[in-house]
Amino acid sequence: MNARKSLMLFGILLLMGGAVGAQDPGEAPKPGPEHKKIAFFAGKWTFDADMKPSPFGPGGKVTGGETCEWFAGGFQLTCRSSSKGPTGESTGMGIWAFDPAEKVYTYYGFGSDGMAFLSKGKVAGETWTWNNDMKMGEKTIKSRFTIKQASADAYSFKWETSPDGDTWTTVQEGKATRSK
Protein backbone atom coordinates (compact mmCIF):
# COMPACT_ATOMS: atom_id res chain seq x y z
CA MET A 1 0.00 0.00 0.00
CA ASN A 2 1.45 3.37 -0.90
CA ALA A 3 1.87 6.22 1.60
CA ARG A 4 -1.07 8.21 0.25
CA LYS A 5 -3.52 5.29 0.67
CA SER A 6 -2.12 4.61 4.14
CA LEU A 7 -2.75 8.21 5.18
CA MET A 8 -6.32 8.12 3.81
CA LEU A 9 -7.05 4.85 5.63
CA PHE A 10 -5.54 6.25 8.85
CA GLY A 11 -7.70 9.40 8.50
CA ILE A 12 -10.88 7.38 7.95
CA LEU A 13 -10.12 5.15 10.95
CA LEU A 14 -9.39 8.22 13.09
CA LEU A 15 -12.71 9.82 12.09
CA MET A 16 -14.62 6.60 12.73
CA GLY A 17 -13.02 6.22 16.14
CA GLY A 18 -13.87 9.82 17.01
CA ALA A 19 -17.49 9.34 15.95
CA VAL A 20 -17.82 6.18 18.04
CA GLY A 21 -16.10 7.81 21.01
CA ALA A 22 -18.37 10.89 20.76
CA GLN A 23 -21.51 8.81 21.29
CA ASP A 24 -22.73 8.92 24.88
CA PRO A 25 -24.09 5.57 25.99
CA GLY A 26 -25.92 7.30 28.88
CA GLU A 27 -29.52 8.42 29.08
CA ALA A 28 -31.11 10.87 26.66
CA PRO A 29 -31.39 14.42 27.99
CA LYS A 30 -34.60 15.27 29.82
CA PRO A 31 -36.48 18.58 30.02
CA GLY A 32 -35.67 20.58 33.13
CA PRO A 33 -37.77 22.85 35.35
CA GLU A 34 -37.38 25.75 32.89
CA HIS A 35 -39.04 23.67 30.17
CA LYS A 36 -41.87 22.71 32.52
CA LYS A 37 -42.77 26.42 32.99
CA ILE A 38 -43.65 26.57 29.29
CA ALA A 39 -46.28 23.86 29.96
CA PHE A 40 -48.69 26.59 31.09
CA PHE A 41 -49.20 27.50 27.41
CA ALA A 42 -49.92 23.94 26.23
CA GLY A 43 -53.48 23.37 25.06
CA LYS A 44 -56.14 25.14 23.07
CA TRP A 45 -56.70 28.87 23.67
CA THR A 46 -59.07 31.56 22.44
CA PHE A 47 -58.19 35.24 22.63
CA ASP A 48 -59.73 38.69 22.23
CA ALA A 49 -57.63 41.81 21.85
CA ASP A 50 -57.85 45.48 21.00
CA MET A 51 -55.39 46.61 18.34
CA LYS A 52 -54.39 50.27 18.40
CA PRO A 53 -53.76 52.16 15.16
CA SER A 54 -50.03 51.78 14.46
CA PRO A 55 -47.53 51.09 11.66
CA PHE A 56 -48.81 47.50 11.89
CA GLY A 57 -52.30 48.50 10.69
CA PRO A 58 -55.56 50.14 11.70
CA GLY A 59 -57.04 49.76 15.14
CA GLY A 60 -59.91 47.43 15.98
CA LYS A 61 -60.97 44.16 17.55
CA VAL A 62 -58.86 41.02 17.04
CA THR A 63 -60.21 37.54 17.85
CA GLY A 64 -58.65 34.16 17.37
CA GLY A 65 -57.38 30.91 18.69
CA GLU A 66 -54.15 29.05 19.24
CA THR A 67 -53.30 25.39 19.82
CA CYS A 68 -49.95 24.57 21.46
CA GLU A 69 -48.49 21.06 21.71
CA TRP A 70 -45.22 19.59 22.90
CA PHE A 71 -42.69 18.78 20.21
CA ALA A 72 -41.12 15.30 20.49
CA GLY A 73 -38.78 15.19 23.47
CA GLY A 74 -40.67 17.77 25.55
CA PHE A 75 -38.16 20.61 25.13
CA GLN A 76 -40.19 22.88 22.81
CA LEU A 77 -43.83 23.83 22.55
CA THR A 78 -45.13 24.32 19.01
CA CYS A 79 -48.17 26.53 18.38
CA ARG A 80 -50.49 27.21 15.46
CA SER A 81 -52.79 30.20 15.52
CA SER A 82 -55.47 31.89 13.47
CA SER A 83 -57.02 35.30 13.95
CA LYS A 84 -59.35 37.82 12.42
CA GLY A 85 -58.88 41.55 12.83
CA PRO A 86 -58.91 44.93 11.13
CA THR A 87 -56.51 43.76 8.41
CA GLY A 88 -58.40 40.51 7.74
CA GLU A 89 -57.64 36.89 8.54
CA SER A 90 -54.17 35.56 9.32
CA THR A 91 -52.47 32.40 10.51
CA GLY A 92 -49.23 31.89 12.37
CA MET A 93 -46.85 29.44 13.95
CA GLY A 94 -44.61 29.77 16.97
CA ILE A 95 -42.07 27.77 18.92
CA TRP A 96 -41.50 28.23 22.67
CA ALA A 97 -38.16 27.00 24.03
CA PHE A 98 -35.54 27.58 26.71
CA ASP A 99 -31.94 28.40 25.81
CA PRO A 100 -29.78 27.00 28.65
CA ALA A 101 -26.61 28.70 27.33
CA GLU A 102 -28.13 32.20 27.61
CA LYS A 103 -30.57 31.23 30.38
CA VAL A 104 -33.48 32.86 28.52
CA TYR A 105 -36.71 31.69 27.00
CA THR A 106 -37.02 32.02 23.24
CA TYR A 107 -40.04 32.41 21.02
CA TYR A 108 -39.72 32.20 17.27
CA GLY A 109 -42.88 33.28 15.48
CA PHE A 110 -43.93 33.83 11.91
CA GLY A 111 -47.20 34.51 10.18
CA SER A 112 -49.10 34.60 6.93
CA ASP A 113 -48.72 38.40 7.01
CA GLY A 114 -44.99 38.00 6.27
CA MET A 115 -43.84 38.88 9.78
CA ALA A 116 -41.10 36.73 11.36
CA PHE A 117 -39.33 37.41 14.63
CA LEU A 118 -37.23 35.92 17.42
CA SER A 119 -37.97 37.14 20.92
CA LYS A 120 -36.03 36.45 24.10
CA GLY A 121 -37.77 36.48 27.43
CA LYS A 122 -37.70 35.92 31.13
CA VAL A 123 -40.33 34.92 33.64
CA ALA A 124 -40.70 36.48 37.10
CA GLY A 125 -43.47 34.88 39.14
CA GLU A 126 -46.54 34.91 36.88
CA THR A 127 -45.21 37.54 34.44
CA TRP A 128 -43.43 36.73 31.19
CA THR A 129 -41.60 39.56 29.40
CA TRP A 130 -40.37 39.13 25.82
CA ASN A 131 -38.18 41.56 23.88
CA ASN A 132 -36.98 41.83 20.31
CA ASP A 133 -35.86 44.33 17.71
CA MET A 134 -37.99 44.69 14.58
CA LYS A 135 -37.14 46.30 11.26
CA MET A 136 -39.70 48.78 9.95
CA GLY A 137 -38.29 49.92 6.63
CA GLU A 138 -34.90 51.45 7.43
CA LYS A 139 -35.66 51.88 11.15
CA THR A 140 -35.25 49.37 13.97
CA ILE A 141 -37.87 49.52 16.68
CA LYS A 142 -37.91 47.73 19.99
CA SER A 143 -40.81 45.44 20.76
CA ARG A 144 -41.94 44.17 24.17
CA PHE A 145 -44.63 41.55 24.77
CA THR A 146 -45.82 40.98 28.35
CA ILE A 147 -47.97 38.05 29.50
CA LYS A 148 -49.51 37.93 32.99
CA GLN A 149 -50.92 34.60 34.09
CA ALA A 150 -54.29 35.33 35.74
CA SER A 151 -55.18 31.72 36.60
CA ALA A 152 -54.39 28.18 35.47
CA ASP A 153 -56.58 28.79 32.40
CA ALA A 154 -56.27 32.51 31.60
CA TYR A 155 -53.76 35.24 30.94
CA SER A 156 -53.66 38.86 29.81
CA PHE A 157 -51.15 40.24 27.33
CA LYS A 158 -49.82 43.54 26.08
CA TRP A 159 -47.65 44.33 23.06
CA GLU A 160 -45.67 47.58 23.09
CA THR A 161 -43.14 49.19 20.76
CA SER A 162 -40.50 51.86 21.27
CA PRO A 163 -38.15 53.77 18.98
CA ASP A 164 -35.51 54.06 21.73
CA GLY A 165 -36.30 51.60 24.55
CA ASP A 166 -37.42 54.43 26.85
CA THR A 167 -40.79 55.61 25.50
CA TRP A 168 -43.27 52.76 24.93
CA THR A 169 -46.53 52.80 22.96
CA THR A 170 -49.17 50.10 23.36
CA VAL A 171 -49.97 48.35 20.08
CA GLN A 172 -52.29 45.62 21.39
CA GLU A 173 -53.88 44.46 24.66
CA GLY A 174 -55.98 41.40 25.27
CA LYS A 175 -56.93 38.29 27.19
CA ALA A 176 -56.67 34.59 26.44
CA THR A 177 -58.66 31.72 27.90
CA ARG A 178 -57.92 28.00 27.73
CA SER A 179 -60.68 26.07 25.97
CA LYS A 180 -62.05 23.12 27.89
Image (tube, grey):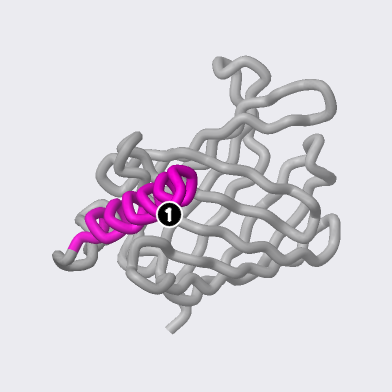
Residue that badge 1 annotates: 1
Residue drawn at (46%, 38%) of the image: 120
Instruction: Between residue 128 and residue 6, name the one nearer to us.
Output: 6
How far from the left and from the top, in percent, is residue 130? 48, 39
Q: Is residue 113 magenta?
A: no
Q: Is residue 104 left or right of residue 86?
A: left
**Residue 164 figure quarter:** top right
How far from the left and from the top, in percent, is residue 111? 72, 57
How far from the left and from the top, in percent, is residue 168? 60, 24
How far from the left and from the top, in percent, is residue 122? 36, 39
As drawn, the residue found furthest toward the left would be 26
The local secondary structure at tag 1 comes to: loop
Instruction: Between residue 44 and residue 152, name the one nearer to us.
Output: 44
Q: Which residues are magenta?
A: 1-24
Residue drawn at (35%, 34%) of the image: 102
Q: Is residue 151 left or right of residue 47?
A: left
